[in-house]
Amino acid sequence: MSNVSWAKESGTTLADKTSERAASSVLVPLLRQLRRDKLAVVGIAFVLLVGIVAVLAPVLPIPDPNATRPSARLALPGTEGYILGSDQLGRDILSRIVWGGRVSLAVGFGATLIAMMVGSALGLISGYFMGITDHAIMRFVDVLMAFPYILLAIALVAALGPGLFNAMIAIAVVNFSFYARGVRGAVLVLREADFIEAARSIGATNAHIIWRHVWPNIVPPILVFVSLTVGWMITETAGLSFIGLGAQPPTADWGTMLSDGRQYLMVAYHVTIIPGIVILLVVLSLNLVGDGLRDALDPRLRN
């Protein structure tokens, strides 16, 4: 092996190790710091509990969420056979909340994943290559951000047709611009780091630098942003279902449950209040997790 080849290989290995150390220096203390944040631990535990119950819905001893029983309509919580009561058709509210969690969480997290992947890719390309590429991508993002995002989501679902899949795509489209902006800002700072310059100086390709050096070091802030945004995407999913553009009857969904029960609010408040409380607790827990991640990754807030 020639001296030049050996130097390049050694330089690449050193740059890779430097990048990995930079990423691990952020990720290693993260779990340790989160364990000290009691509110974040509570948030993580509640979200995991809701997720596990939703996943296990088919094997849980609960009735069919779509089974009607007119003789037991609007039963109060605690009524025999109805722990959380029943709705206007006599359907078990507990069962519909559990099954509705599968829908709401799947659409909310799915939209977040799509928005994160698309937005992060655009932000990486824009921040790293700069120039005309950056201008073209950012102007497109600016156009999307100029519209009120909930109205844009409604317009997209109205154009695509009501349904959970279309609602998920619409929510992802109106939110990926936030990821693109955030990732671009992180990459602009990171691209001037010493280990990036070292990798570039020894002839590493752009693809290698982005994958081995840039991406691992922007994952932590992306995770924080995901934990902070997934809550409002679940809320947006419920909002679209509330106005009839998301889940379609008889599919159980938290937003649909709110919509179905609003006309009985004065005579059977539990039909609307209970799913509303569930949405509140899930979103609050996700925000607690996001705050904990933010505090753990910000040296100024660790103490």
Image (spheres, rainbow, N blue to C red):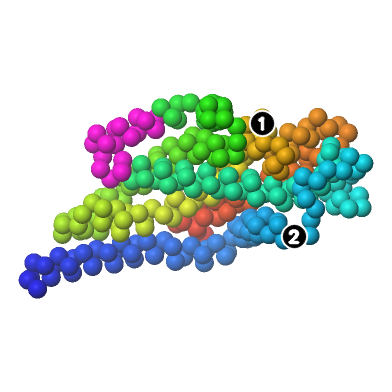
Q: SS for tag 2? A: loop
Residue shown at 36% from the left, 45% from the top? 121
Q: Main secondary structure of the magenta part?
A: helix
Q: Is residue 268 left or right of residue 66?
A: right
Start-end of magenta stretch: 125-142
Determine crowd level at label 1: few under 14, some 14-19, many 20+ residues with C-alpha closer than 10 A: some
Q: Give whichever of 256, 12 is nearer the camera.
A: 256
> Mark 2 or 1 closer to N-term?
2
Does residue 46 appear anywhere in the picture? no
Q: Is residue 71 left or right of residue 240?
A: right
**Where 98 falls versus 71 (above or below)?**
below
Q: CA distance from mark 2 to mark 1?
A: 29 Å
Residue shown at 67% from the left, 55% from the top? 54
Q: Which mark is residue 210?
A: none
Where does residue 295 sit, x and y in percent of width and height? Answer: 51, 54
Residue type at mark 1: give it: Gly
Quarter of the image where one finds residue 177: top left
Q: Which mark is residue 60?
A: 2
Residue shown at 52% from the left, 67% from the top? 32
Q: Give whichever of 119, 156 is nearer the camera.
A: 156
Does residue 219 appear anywhere in the picture? yes
**Where 197 falls versus 183 (above or below)?**
below
Where does residue 250 sit, x and y in percent of width and height? Answer: 72, 39
Q: Is residue 219 left or right of residue 276?
A: left
